[in-house]
Amino acid sequence: MKMHSLHVLVLTCVTVLLAGQGRAESARNPVLWADVPDVAAIRVGDTYYMASTTMHMSPGLPIMKSKNLVNWELVGYAYDTLADNEALRLENGRNAYGRGSWAPCLRYHNGTFYASTFSATSGRTHIYTTADIEKGPWKETAFAPSLHDHSLFFDDDGRVYMLYGVGNLRLTELEPDLSGIKKGGFNEVVIPNASAVAGPNISLQAEGSQMRKIDGRYYVMNITWPRGGVRTQILHRADKITGPYESKLILQDQGVAQGCLIDTPDGKWYALLFQDNGAVGRSPWLVPVKWEDGWPVLGADGKAPTTLDIDVDHQGLGNLVTSDEFNRKSREPLPLAWQWNHNPDNRYWSIGERSGYLRLTTGRVDSDVLQARNMLTQRTFGPVSSATTKIEVGNMKDGDCAGLIALQRRYGFVGVKRQGDSKSIVMVSAQSNTPEEVQSIPLTQQTVHLRIDCDFRDRTDKAYFYYSLDGETWTEIGSVLQMAYTLPHFMGYRFGLFNFASETAGGFVDFDYYRIGDELVSAAVSADAPRLPFAAPLKWTSTDVLIRPISDETHTIVSVKDPTVVRYNDLWHVYATVYSTSARTWNMVYLNFADWSDAPNAKLHFLDRNPNMGGYKCAPHLFYFTPHEKWYLVYQTQPPAYSTTDDISKPETWTAPQRFFDRQPASMPRLPIDYHVICDDTHAYLFFTGDDGNFYRSRTRIEDFPKGMSDPEIAIRDHRNNLFEGSITYKIKGTDTYLTIIEALNPARYYRAWTSDRLDGQWTPVSDADSWQTPFAGINNVTFEDGVAPWTRDISHGELIRDGYDEKMILDPDNLQFLYQGRDPASGGRYELLPYQLGLLRLDRTP
């Protein structure tokens, strides 16, 4: 466990916490770094109003206002609860996660404000009206059926419509009092195959309709999603509401899409859209608009700008998130930032029953935190955010669990659990979709402070969990949660306070405060992490393909991959994996050459010609083990195996495979892959990944190598897509720092980096070399040599060029080169048939 002393002043409103003060500066996108999707906005005079989706949360259909389209203030909600049914009450195993209400529409017509939405949970279309959008009250009209992603529209002739649907967009006339679909009224598809303008290969058909009438023309904004592409904004226009409509693709950049057109009092135009922003949710973007030939042109040169032409004194989240000391009288309303997860049961929560505390009482028995009623939530926010609380647990009953959660389908929480007469602090992770109690620590006092830190920078999307017995020294507990935006919940992560019973109802806990911040515990100790002797973010330049799969008369191969490389006796020696379609298995090849320019002409020697090396063998790692004066080749058989030789230039001399483990260790993952060895002065370490998001290590004393390996333990925990395979570890020359790089999987293959001061120590991610946007090595920081056409999007399984060839795995930071595998981006199909080839990256040190 890691313990950190941290003294942070947490302010009561994130407006101050995040906004900053001083001179006016240009606003930036996203305008709100939080989950505010499906934005619909109007302007009334000089004030803008915006509605958004909060799905299964209550109250719902939030209403915000702004004077500049950048800084937004919550003013209320259109409803307290959407409906009253089993799903919204979390009864009988039912729930409304990812459903509830979707995609609102906001209108102002003849002195009345309209906020409409639809719901698969209620099966109805809901329209809320008020004369005062900021104070209410709201009146509801609802009817069946539920009209998907509709746009409410009042035409100049007094008729009122909803345009709705997916793919084929239908215009339906409503009764004048909005009580339902008008019998005998207009009801036809007016925009068939609305996605067609974005191409024939569409994964998400056009939806998200928002209609406006501008200068006598009808404009319909929609989104669609081409297969393999990004969320795309399209537009249809017509001279009559019933069509015919002509269509145009108006923005296809960074997935910024879905929303509305809006004008300012001084005649400027913008599109208010959103972007899928990783685990924090879907965040609003503001895109400038100009008009050409009656079409809105979004952005600059087809790009949604990060910086806007709007000067603001500050930019923050206003009252969308807030700290709360719970110092209010009973029945006083909660701050608007709070929403209940599903419908609350007002019998079992209170503020003021005990002065200065939020009390959550269990009213029934539940099997899981996701079924617990009266979970009180707020949005997480970026780029980093934290939530802390203090909980008193003296009145819990046997089987109760209460605490602080990072809420989504793959949730994580830190809390207190009572079993019998004892209590423990627990961290539970559902990263695998199944809850797992990762760590439990006995608790002997009646109060404890809990904390969750969320890091959304560069879509890192990690949550860290802590507890404190005194509110000053924080101790990390459990594992890091790789947050993921999943469709079953369809919502960005939320912080939540909860209490549920698994045995007997009636226990309660008291929360003393809820405080948000924008500092991470890890930031207070990052100075202790080992430093790299080269600056990140890095830039690389790639060669053309150097080593290709070349078949011979007995081997038909489709790829060459997983290289290991050393410089010895003035030659480069490379061992690599190949897949033989003739043998239908993986094996290995060897080649050597004097200079990289000679690599394309080097002959491949197939290791299965050695009688000892036939059959399934792949992912080699080569080194000279000085104590034995032998070369070792470590590889995958599936268990880790090794062979030895006195002459690496003669692949026919490798000895028969020997296994590192004489039994299957209980801690071995189901699918261990890609083994490598590195030694310090006392121990030899076997590192590998497990196809499960974990990086494993075993070790033995130098004098016992290769025998005596300990049972594997987890050295780094993460998510499978972020920590996949192709790991390799080095000691940086002239330092006490070790560097590990590991391949990540998504959106394309790239490498992340960690450092440690000990091979058996804690590994720390390298800032600016740890994400898709700023990788250690990935297509986002790789360019190709002049005259070389980009031949790969994957920067995949490879090795850095060592300063030497022995077991110490020394890396010269002044000569960084990386032999890696890549493939034609257009290739696909079965993994073993992917046409991987080898190229070389060289570090680009130019400014």
Image: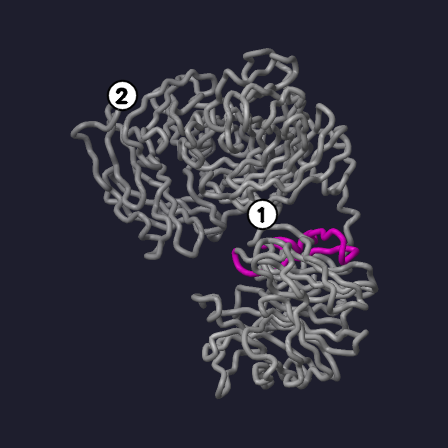
Label located before the other in sequence (2 or 1): 2
x 75%, y 78%: residue: 630
Total labels: the figure holds 2
Left or right: 303, with 195 as reference point: right
Image quadrant holding the N terminus, namely: top right
Q: In the displayed structure, would residue 20 be above or below residue 299?
A: above
* Residue contact between numbered discs 2 and 1, judged by CB atoms under 8 Å: no
**Which type of secondary structure does the marked residue at label 1 adopt?**
helix
Q: Mark 2 points at which residue?
A: 177
Image quadrant holding the C terminus, namely: bottom right
Q: Give the range drawn in magenta.
A: 747-774
Out of 558 and 201, give the one closest to the viewer: 558
Q: In the displayed structure, would residue 420 be above or below residue 305?
A: above
Q: Which residue lies furthest to the left in this view?
A: 184
Residue 504 pos. (x, y %): 54, 23
Residue 822: in magenta span = no
Q: How far apart are marks 2 and 1 (CA)?
A: 46 Å
x 35%, y 47%: residue: 293
Residue 753: in magenta span = yes
Q: Give the class, few, some or many, for how many residues have Cα within 10 Å of label 2's Cα (few <14, many ≥20).
A: few
Q: Residue 459 carries which label?
A: 1
Residue type at the position of mark 2: Asp
Q: Which of marks 2 and 1 is in front?
A: 1
Left or right: 215, with 300 as reference point: left
Q: Can residue 214 be seen in this view?
A: no
Q: How is the structure coloured here?
A: one colour
Residue 228: quarter of image: bottom left
Q: In the displayed structure, would residue 666 be above or below residue 636?
A: above
